[in-house]
Image (tube, rainbow, N blue to C red):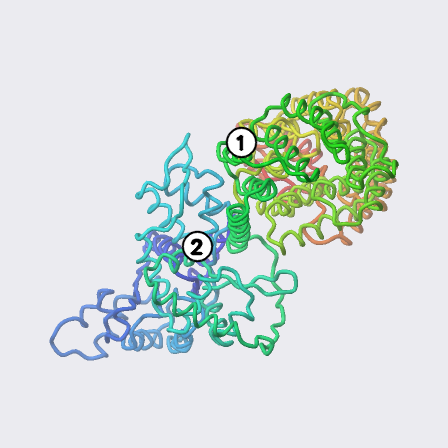
Amino acid sequence: MDDRAVSFRKTTEIIASGGSVEILGEHGVGKSHLVHQIVEHFRNLTWRVIEVRGIYAYRTTPFACLSLAGVETVPSGRGFSVGAVVSELAALLGDDDALLVLEDADFIDDASWGALSAVCSRKRIPTIVSRLPGSSRHRVGNQLEGLSIAPGFGVRLGPLGFDELAAVIERATGHPMHPSTTSSVFAESGGNVGLALTMVRAAIHDGKMQLDRGSWVASGTFWSNALIPYVDALLAELTDEQWDALEILALLGIVELDTLVEFTGHEVPTQLEDLALIGLYPSAGRLLVTVQPPLLVDFFRQRPAAARRHKLSKMLEAHLGGDTAKAIPFHLPELTATPDAPFVRLVHEHLRNRMLVAQSEWSRSPSRTTLANLIEISVSAGATQEELEELFDLAAGLPTEASEAIMVRWVLLQVDHWLFISREFDRALTTLVEESGRFPRLGPLLNVRAFEVQGALLPQADPDLLPDPKDTRLDVRVRVAVHEALGAHLLRDGNPDAARAHYAAAESIDVRPPSIERTGFVIMTEYFGGHPELARTYTEQGLAAARESFDNLAIRGFCYMSALIDILDGRYWRAEESIRLALSLGEPIRQPPFVHLSLIVMGAVLAAVRGDLRTAQLLQAQYEALPVPDSLLPGGTRGWASAHITAASGDAAAGADLAEAGGDELWARGSKLNAGLTYLTALDLDPTAERLDRLRERLMSLASEYFARRLELFESIVAGAAGKAAATGTQLAAGGFYGDALTAYRVAQNLAEEAGDAAQAAAHKQQYDELRAELPREEFGDIHAENLGSQLTAREQEITRLVLAGATNQQIADRLVLSVRTIESHMHRIMKKTGVRKRGDLASVVNLPG
């Protein structure tokens, strides 16, 4: 249930019990929509509802708000008394089942407030107060005391998240938006639903957003003069100093808070933060400040006030040209790291600035170096194939440069374009081999790349392409590249210990920070080599550094690694957050390679495991439509997700067959590590002796602690050996594989119960409980139980859904026209599959498709 649904439910419960509610939020976050839902709810219950709305233009006109609310004693020209107004209000509200709604309470005139206070002093009336937060509106808080109400519940509406905003826009327009357009709307609107809908409708009206194969796709900026009334309302109460500060931020883009304080003083930024018109974000020891919602930047930049901007620029230069060392240091507050629209805008702004710099450098000094920089940034910014090929064509008029490093870099850049964008695989391989002989010192780098490409496309790469990395006569860059290529090859082959040796050798040769690709391989090497805690640490550190630098490629790469490890651990909530952050940055995601496919596949796996079959199938349609092949690395295999989706549809055995077939295909392609993971999925979904016999030899051939322990667990399940399962759980916990250890203890408990050994079952449950108590809350879930929750048959899902709704066995039997004994038999299988002992525990381990 989303936050607004929770707010609606709690608000109606409190009002029904005689309490009152205060709803706070900025313009456009949905206060009016929530109030309307609540009012309609109680009107349908035949309550009397009096709605009084504050209007900014009439805030100083006595009794204006009550007059507009329909109080008849107010508007006539004949004499009237305040007592008459109060009496009419009291009569309108009655004595029972009445609701008073004060919407936009900030702007209710004082005379109307007085009459409302008098009525509330006579009788205690459930009241909804809707207002803007903070700022100079403290008078509203004092007036609430005069109303003699004590709000029983406070609702603070904020921006919507990426997925929620996309769903609202789809409902409003009748069509989904392309993910890249959703990202732009999300970033520009700051998640403000009112502004986002206004932007989208204006863009559709202006022809800037059009339907393309059933999805809305935008072109160009979202700014439109149609948005001016909305922005004017948002900024209506700003002082001159606050307005100047926002306009300065619009001119500067992203600045440190101390820079803004130097120009405005300390009070104005505090006021703007209170009004939710700026956001503060820590980055590498600094505190950055940016305008929010970000569309305000376009508003200020589009204003035709050139003279005013010139004046502000001169004032800014005067302030920043002085001594800024005297600025008071700002202590960083505790800020959450959750992805949100302003952060996405910062990433977009950072990329835009890099693009402007690269374009400027290319224009000022055309060369292969400056052109390569421009192409690399254009790829990360999502340039089309045609746009990139136009850039490559510009090299035809450039002289060949003497530097081997520049020319080899250029060849590698072209090859990557053919591999990942134009998909000319043969051309890429041929060019690498042919061009390598042209460069005596760095030519072997092209052979190394050819080896890597062969490993991705062919069952076996040619080892003769690689020189000896121990040859100290080779260029350092070549030796490092060979070690990295061999490490990746050995990891894919299921030998993480041997891979680790090559990565350690690469690090000893070149101590500079490694690339995202090498770091990703090192993380997987540590995880599958039996060092999951180290892998988690590297991932968290890398993602934190990427966020601080606003590097969109690094953020996506580390989000992929984080999501993969969290799914393997069973930390599904964390995995969903990583995927959401990466996808909110927009599409297409071509770099790092295969990351976008992996994010969609992993999202589908998570949805299937959670029981959200509709979402899983929507994501399945997306990954099936992507033109890239399956990745040979974990997380990017379509069959992995399709197996889970089939199991979630009610046929676990068929899902396991899909996974096993996918594993066979990966094994034939030389990706044994990924094949092993897919085989484990098959056994998770259908742990039978026959399937284990078919897969045992291949799983045993993988030189990995992770696979050895997981294989032991399945051996225990097939043999019905509770003690062996528990011993495996202890080994897994000692190795840091906490999610799988929880699974092992749960399996041991279930096996002991099936054997009728209550004492042993209790001992294994205690092992489970003790480990679970040591782990972070909401992390390291019981993977086995949650996976098995998606194995329920269609009938079992139907019965489980009724159980979750509170129905008894007899009521379920009556509803489904079955015998109670049949229902009891189904319940026994459901509880056995999900690993719960009481029907009340089902809600904690299984979510069913809607």
Residue that numbered label 2 is attached to: 192
C-alpha span from label 2 to label 1: 27 Å
Which one is earlier in the sequence, the residue at label 2 or at label 1?
Answer: 2
Taking the image as shown, residue 78 lies to the left or right of residue 206, namely left
Figure quadrant of residue 837: top right
**Relative image position of residue 281 (x, y in whole percent):** 57, 61
Q: Is residue 45 left or right of residue 843?
A: left
Q: Position of residue 800 (x, y in %)?
A: 59, 36
Front residue of 114/552: it is: 552
Marks 2 and 1 in Cβ contact (< 8 Å):
no
Q: For the residue labelled by badge 1, is the local secondary structure a helix, a strand or a loop?
A: helix
Residue 251 drawn at (x, y percent): 44, 62
Q: Is residue 820 visible?
A: no
Q: Quadrant of residue 77?
A: bottom left
- Circle 1: residue type: Gln
Residue type (three-letter) at the residue carrying disc 2: Asn
Most distant residue in the left direction: 78
Instruction: Assess disc 1: are there few (<14), some (14-19) or many (≥20) residues with their C-alpha within 10 Å of its C-alpha.
Output: some
